[in-house]
Amino acid sequence: MADNTRGTLYLVPTPIGNLEDMTYRAVRILNEVDAIAAEDTRHTGILLKHFDIQKPLISYHEHNKEEKGGYIMDLLEQGQSIACVSDAGMPAISDPGADLVTRAIERGIDIVPLPGCNAALTALIASGLDTKQFTFFGFLPKRGKHRIEALEAMAKQTGTLMLYEAPHRLKEVLTDMHSVLGNRQIVVAREVTKKFETFLRTDLGALVEDLEQITYKGEFVLLIGGCDTVEQYDDESNEAEPVSYEEAVQALVDQGIPKKEAIREVAKRFGVSRRDVYNVVERQ
């Protein structure tokens, strides 16, 4: 039997810029819970005032999540219902709300997630990149060495890569991406759903040649094309083996075909431009 004496943890998305994106259900739940756990109580207070919601706020963020996480669990076990909100978007996505969810699961507390805004997915559907397969990486490490290692780890990922980045680090991040990932398609989505929303659709090579085409203010989502692979089938084994540009070019070179011709042949095989193959192969 369910324990009806315990409260429920609600995960309530909030608008990422446009207050009209708040759902009726989210407003109702925030009006019904006993308290709201928020990253920035001042920021959330503005949202609550706009929708005339008057509920106690609990400051819950990355720097106090150990102390306040336990306090929130105690309230839930006492029968109070708590809503967890992020400053913007989905709680628990690159957000301390994830720790609250883990604690609630460990204690057997009911969790009810609400659908709503997410900057990465909102940017993805307008990017023109692959929406069938994609991977969200959150924020890259701040330090250069660790950032390079993270990019190297995602270099072989197929499907669209989705990341968040701060404006003051964006130039060096884009430069590192071009160095590690090569020349791939990229979409720089800025201020998604807000007044100054922009989408810059280009490739990493062209972007790093003119980094001043970006306005370095606001919030950014980066969407990068994944590592292109094809499946080649061995007629005898009928097994699939992914082949990259580098592997395909090297296989032809090993057969005595000049590298320039090999690049042309691989580009034709993959259905891409020779420049794309050349940029990937020559960075090795």
Image: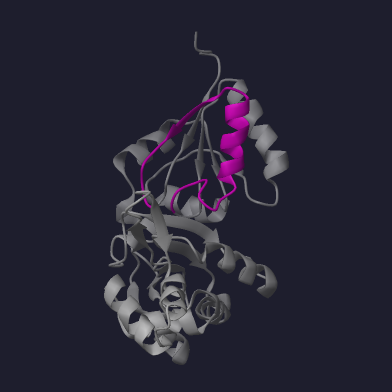
Taking the spot 50% from the left edge, 80% from the top edge, the residue there is 178
Whole-percent x, y for residue 256 in the image = 43, 83
Of residues 136 and 24, the one drawn nearer to the viewer in this rendering? 136
- The answer to whether one can see residue 9 in this image is yes
Part of the protein shown in magenta? 89-118
Left or right for 130, reference 84:
left
Of residues 28 and 267, the one drawn nearer to the viewer in this rendering? 267
Res 23 quadrant in image: top left
Whole-percent x, y for residue 194 in the image = 35, 67
| 227 in magenta | no
Of residues 56 and 283, the one drawn nearer to the viewer in this rendering? 283
Whole-percent x, y for residue 128 in the image = 27, 67
Left or right for 174, reference 143:
left
User: What is the basis of the colouring in this image?
Assistant: one colour
Q: How many marks?
A: 0
Check the image and report above or below for 90 versus 248.
Answer: above
Of residues 127 and 180, the one drawn nearer to the viewer in this rendering? 180
Taking the spot 62% from the left edge, 45% from the top edge, the residue there is 60
Check the image and report above or below for 28 versus 4.
Answer: below
Taking the spot 35% from the left edge, 58% from the top edge, the residue there is 231
State the residue lying farthest toward the right.
67
- The answer to whether one can see residue 118 in this image is no
Check the image and report above or below for 135 versus 5.
Answer: below
Whole-percent x, y for residue 17 in the image = 38, 61
| 93 in magenta | yes
Taking the spot 34% from the left edge, 76% from the top edge, the residue there is 266
Res 202 quadrant in image: bottom left
State the residue lying farthest toward the top.
1
